[in-house]
Amino acid sequence: MKSYLDRLYDALRSVKLAIVLLVVLVLFAVAGGVIPQGKPVDFYATQFGGSIGNLIVLLGLNHVFSSLAFLIAAALFAVNLTVCTFHRLTLEIGKPWEKRRHGPDILHVGILILLFGGILTARTRTETILEVQKGQAAALPDGSTIVLTDFDFETYPDGRPKNWVSTVTIGTQTQRQIKVNSPLREHGYSIYQKYWKNETNVILLDPTGMEITLRQGMRQPTMDGFVFFMAISTDYSSPAQAPGSTSIGSNSLSENNPVFLVEDHNKRLVIKAYEGDKVGPFIYKGTVENSISGLAVVSDKGYPYVVAGFVLVALGVFLTYVQKLKGLVP
């Protein structure tokens, strides 16, 4: 009769246990893809109903890959695969060299590394979005500076978008390119070309004639309040003017007119301006179109392990296939 440790050892290397755990992990993965992750608790009650929403939160399905149940299932699968690999490897080592079949062992090790990398990614992956214009600089996670030196929007002959290409420099390095599906990997993080957009900025002239450029959502402080650039209006209605303000060239209608919120002595007024109009203490000069490159800076400590795991899995499958063929050929 087998001892308790022997029975435990056999259970941990059981193929049935491996299949059950794989099914559980697949179900977790499906839940993580179907159920929005990381939302406020109230979101799930509203989206799925009170009882189901509460069950989702209770089971930790609102953060599947960091939930206790998923981590326990993943840990058990890792133990099962480790014991199975150890058991099989000890048997293979006892055979003559020409009869050994280490393809499945390499495959198992690759799966273990892949599993570890996947969990590490789920637990530690961070993503930061940078929006930069040509000539602008932004800070990277390691404290270095990235500068967008050029941007190119490539299209097919029929005008459909083909590619976005950002040319950047990091610190004192030479220029590097970031393309869609071709990220720049640097010092433990990756920089992806996430999106591209055109942005309309407005130009104001202060009383001294100096130009001030505002992006949508920015405000410019004044002596007695501020001027806030709200949006671009596309209708042709007459502009609203602040009491006592002057208008220069208001009759020259423009399709796109900026809308400002002006605060002066605790009084607020919304103004749709035309070129030459007065906006608080400023004169609206016009707009300028700027291309904005959206870059995603991703820090993923599990990435090297995932790559190494995939390589070992592929190698293990290849060796297993080759060794099977050798066994079939007389």
Image: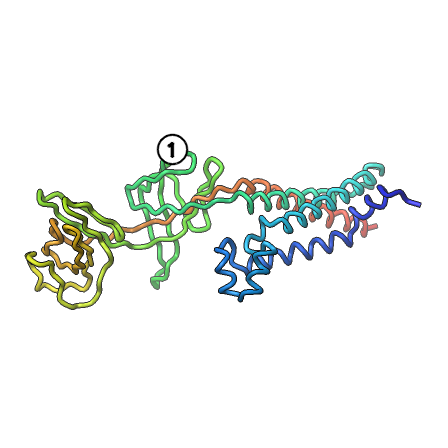
Q: Would residue 103 be seen by someone viewing this image from the given angle?
A: no
Residue ID at (31%, 50%): 292
Between 210 and 59, the residue placed more toward the observer is 59
Instruction: State the SS at label 1.
Output: loop
**In the image, residue 222 lies at what x, y percent?**
16, 45
Q: Nearer the viewer, residue 119 or 185?
A: 119
Are there few (<14), some (14-19), or many (20+) residues within 10 Å of tag 1?
few
Residue 254 higher or lower than 183, as above or below: below
Q: Nearer the viewer, residue 183 or 51?
A: 51
Q: Amino acid at mark 1?
A: Gln
Residue 234 is situated, as x and y percent measured from the top left of the image, at 22, 65
Residue at the disc numbered 1 = 173
> Is there any visible trace of residue 202 in the rendered image?
yes
Q: Residue 32, relative to residue 150: is it above or below?
A: below
Side of 47 relative to 93 (left or right):
left
Q: Is residue 264 left or right of residue 47?
A: left
Residue 218 pos. (x, y %): 25, 49
Q: Decide if residue 43 is on the left or right side of residue 6.
A: left
**Which residue, as the protein is rendered here, is positioned at the far right?**
1
- The count of marks equals 1
The residue sitting at the front extreme is 266
Q: Residue at x 49, y 37 (%)?
A: 188
